[in-house]
Image (cartoon, helix red, strand yellow):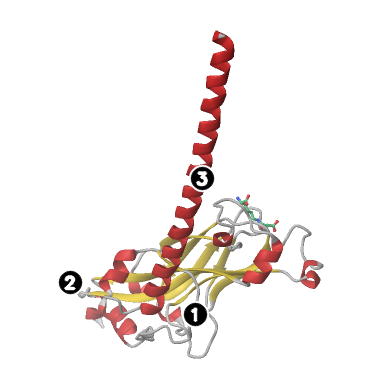
Amino acid sequence: MANERVRVRGLSIFRPIIYGNTARLLTREERENVPAEHTHKWTVAVRSAASAPGSDIVGGADNLGYFLKRVSFKLHDTYPNPTRNIDKPPFEVSETGWGEFEVTIKLHFVPESGEKALTIYHHLKLHPWSLTGEPDSVPPVEVAQKAGPVHSWQYDEIVFNDPYQNFLNILTSNPPTPLPRTNANGRTIPFHVANPASLEASKGGVPEFTTLIERDEVERLEKAKKTIIAEQERTRATLIAKEKELERLQKTLNG
Ligand code: SLL
């Protein structure tokens, strides 16, 4: 018993998680039962990174209750009781609303861990922004409807350094479901990496995340590049027109 509170020095052990949200537009009927300005239903969650086989839920194959005691989600102050404490899995909050905002997520670990709470942040995403090509415009409802549910998930690894022996026992007796080597179910969910170094460290062992993140990022960059080039051309045309105008005015002035 006594040596259970002994730290295993030099050892690091991690658990892969995802955190983020899904969102979809409310149907006409659903809108009748919520405040008039609410347009979306969303779920913000902390889950195991691996998804259950055959499930279309992102992540959540494993019950994280063995190392998480509580997840507290701090919502925007426009929500009643904005701090939502979830004390057992699934660690998630579903709400309706109209706007995007930053959710502060605090992970509280089981007492055996001796770990302090860990705070992470997620920007709640409601709109398929990438579809507009413009950084700050909400896409029209028809566009959003066609695009279907929005997903925004970040992959991260929670690292425990020098764990207590008893906590290490808990962790090792709950091994995480391995992430698939290939993107077997052909998901096209945009993932973001909170801690890119953690993916490097896992040496491409999580292609479900890496390939999708990379492709998504490439597409976003290409689109942004096109927007910038178009913008540059417009600016140049304006400049040329202005210079001509200046020349004309100077002539009138001198003539
Ligand atoms: C924005 N900074 O202006 C953000 C704030 C607030 C979101 C978004 C409804 C809450 C409620 C809600 O969606 N709040 O009234 O129940 O876009």
Q: Is residue 163 above or below residue 80?
A: below
Mark number, residue 27: none
Q: Residues within 10 Å of mark 1 (few under 14, many from 20)?
A: few
Kindly identify which residue carries mark 3.
231
Which of discs 3 and 1 lies nearer the camera? The answer is: 3
Q: Specify whether tag 1 is near ligand 1 (CB below 8 Å).
A: no
Q: CA distance from mark 3 to mark 1?
A: 33 Å
Q: Are marks 2 and 3 in contact (CB under 8 Å)?
A: no
Q: Quadrant of the N terminus?
A: bottom left
Q: Is residue 222 visible?
A: yes
Count every numbered label the image shows and give the total: 3
Which of disc 1 and disc 3 is earlier in sequence?
A: 1
Q: Are marks 3 and 1 in contact (CB under 8 Å)?
A: no
Kindly identify which residue carries mark 1.
187
In the rendered image, residue 158, in percent from the top left (x then y), is placed at 35, 70
Q: Residue 31's image quarter?
A: bottom right
Q: CA distance from mark 2 to mark 3?
A: 53 Å
The residue sitting at 46% across, 74% down in the picture is 69
Q: Relative to residue 215, is residue 205 drawn left or right?
A: left
Q: Amino acid at mark 2?
A: Gly
Task: Give the structural element (helix, strand or loop) at label 3.
Answer: helix
Kindly identify which residue carries mark 2.
10
In the rendered image, residue 248, in percent from the top left (x then y), is placed at 57, 20
Task: Give the structural element (helix, strand or loop) at label 1.
Answer: loop
